[in-house]
Image: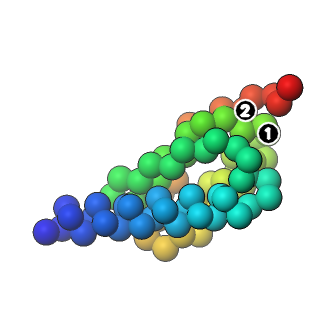
């Protein structure tokens, strides 16, 4: 079914983005949650700067099958 195919694709996209985050020196230490629904990726969690939000969104958009990236990432100063 199409729904099952979508779910499989979403799982693959989420895994691919998480894999890219883990190897990124700036983003690997951060707790960014990735959720994908029908090719729309939502990034949530907190990062240390606005630049990193953009970086995470660009990284997610590079993954095949991603239609849109929504960020609810918050900037929190690292103590």
Name the quadrant of the C terminus.
top right
Residue drawn where x is 20% and y is 64% of the image: 4
Disc ID at residue 49: 1
Q: Is residue 21 left or right of residue 79?
A: left
What element does badge 2 sit on? strand
10 vs 63: above or below: above
Residue drawn where x is 29% and y is 61% of the image: 7
Q: How far from the left and from the top, in percent, is residue 49? A: 79, 39
What element does badge 1 sit on? loop
Residue 43 shows up from this direction? yes
Mark 1 burial class by Cα count in 10 Å: few <14, some 14-19, many 20+ = some
Return the disc, 2 or 1, that comes first in the chain's sequence. 1
Residue 71 shows up from this direction? no
Q: How far from the left and from the top, in percent, is residue 66? A: 46, 65
Residue at the disc numbered 2 = 75
The quarter holding residue 65 reads bottom left
Q: How far from the left and from the top, in percent, is residue 62? A: 59, 69
19 vs 51: above or below: below
Mark 2 burial class by Cα count in 10 Å: few <14, some 14-19, many 20+ = some
Residue drawn where x is 75% and y is 29% of the image: 76
Name the quadrant of the N terminus.
bottom left
43 vs 20: above or below: above
Q: How far from the left and from the top, in percent, is residue 57? A: 62, 54
């Amino acid at each position: 079914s199409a729904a099952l195919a979508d779910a499989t694709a979403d799982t693959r996209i989420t895994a691919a983005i998480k894999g890219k985050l883990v190897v990124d020196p700036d983003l690997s230490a951060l707790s960014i949650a990735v959720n994908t629904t029908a090719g729309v990726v939502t990034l949530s969690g907190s990062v240390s700067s606005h630049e990193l939000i953009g970086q995470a969104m660009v990284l997610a958009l590079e993954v095949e099958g991603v239609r849109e990236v929504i960020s609810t990432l918050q900037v929190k100063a690292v103590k």
